[in-house]
Image: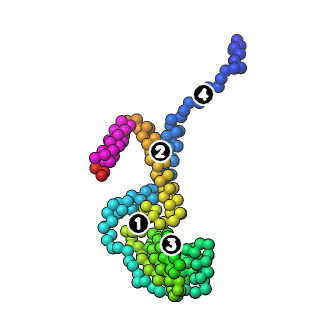
Amino acid sequence: MTSPPQSANKKPAKKRFNKGAFYRTCRMLHGYLSAAAFLLLMFFAASGLLLNHPSWFGADSQDAEPIIVALDFDALQSAQSSETPERAFEELVRNATRVQGQLKDASISDSDAMLRFAGVKGGTDIFIDFELAEAEVETSKANLTSIIHDLHRGKDAGKVWKFMIDITAILILAMSVIGLILFFSLRFRLGNAIRIMGATMALFIALFVFFVP
């Protein structure tokens, strides 16, 4: 007996979604993301705790005694007439003495200029007298608490550190989303997991509504 000919138009069977393979991939990704993010997560968790309790490490930033720096008169005049005098003054002073931080703002008049530098490790205030060709430089060094606070917030930390904060946030967000997906593989604990998530969300909203001024 010959078997009946198969129809040429018969559609191939659709591939079924493989739940097991999907959850295995999620677990693998969750493991790798955890390895990359845990140290960063611990740092930002600890620094956030210190940010909430700034008195734990005490000491304020240390202000050094102001110093007077002599500037080259011709170079000072050249800086005054440049297109970006604040940058020219910055270069002039940096060549003469150590300056802490990055230039944040400047105030320039016909007779003097004030420059303010700020950074995570400290800051510098500079007053330049054009007639005397002198700069008064006052530097402050940040303490440990201040450094940790600024690193946590990305304040005056530079573009590279801010980029690292973005990467950390993306890693933690991805790890959390994958972890949430993995909850649905816990057949016997899924109900409890959803209830805990719901209670956490309700607590979060209640704290914001009733206790945040």
Q: What percent of the width, then of the height, locates residue 161? A: 50, 63
- In percent of the image, x 47 and y 73: which residue is there? 116
Q: Amino acid at mark 3?
A: Ala
For the residues marked 1 and 2, what is the alpha-carbon distance in whole angstroms? Answer: 30 Å
Q: Which numbered disc flags the more N-terminal residue, 4 or 3?
A: 4
Q: Are marks 4 and 2 in contact (CB under 8 Å)?
A: no
Residue designated by label 4: 14
Q: Secondary structure at mark 2?
A: helix
Residue designated by label 1: 148
Q: Secondary structure at mark 4?
A: loop
Q: Secondary structure at mark 1?
A: helix
Q: Are marks 4 and 3 in contact (CB under 8 Å)?
A: no
Quadrant holding the N terminus: top right
Q: Nearer the viewer, mark 2 or mark 3?
A: 3
Q: Nearer the viewer, mark 4 or mark 1?
A: 1
For the residues marked 2 and 3, what is the alpha-carbon distance in whole angstroms? Answer: 47 Å
Q: Which mark is residue 183?
A: none
Residue designated by label 3: 106
Mark 3 crowd level (few <14, some 14–19, many ≥20, 10 Å Cα): some
Q: Which numbered disc flags the more N-terminal residue, 1 or 2?
A: 1
What is the magenta range? 189-210
Residue 146: image quadrant is: bottom left
Q: Which numbered disc flags the more N-terminal residue, 2 or 3?
A: 3
| Residue 39 appears in the picture as rendered | no
Q: Which numbered disc flags the more N-terminal residue, 4 or 1?
A: 4
Q: Amino acid at mark 2?
A: Ile
Q: Which numbered disc flags the more N-terminal residue, 3 or 1?
A: 3
Q: What percent of the width, then of the height, locates residue 113? A: 50, 78
Indicate yes or no whether the magenta region holds residue 23.
no
Residue designated by label 2: 178
- In percent of the image, x 37 and y 68: which residue is there? 145
Indicate yes or no whether the magenta region holds residue 190.
yes
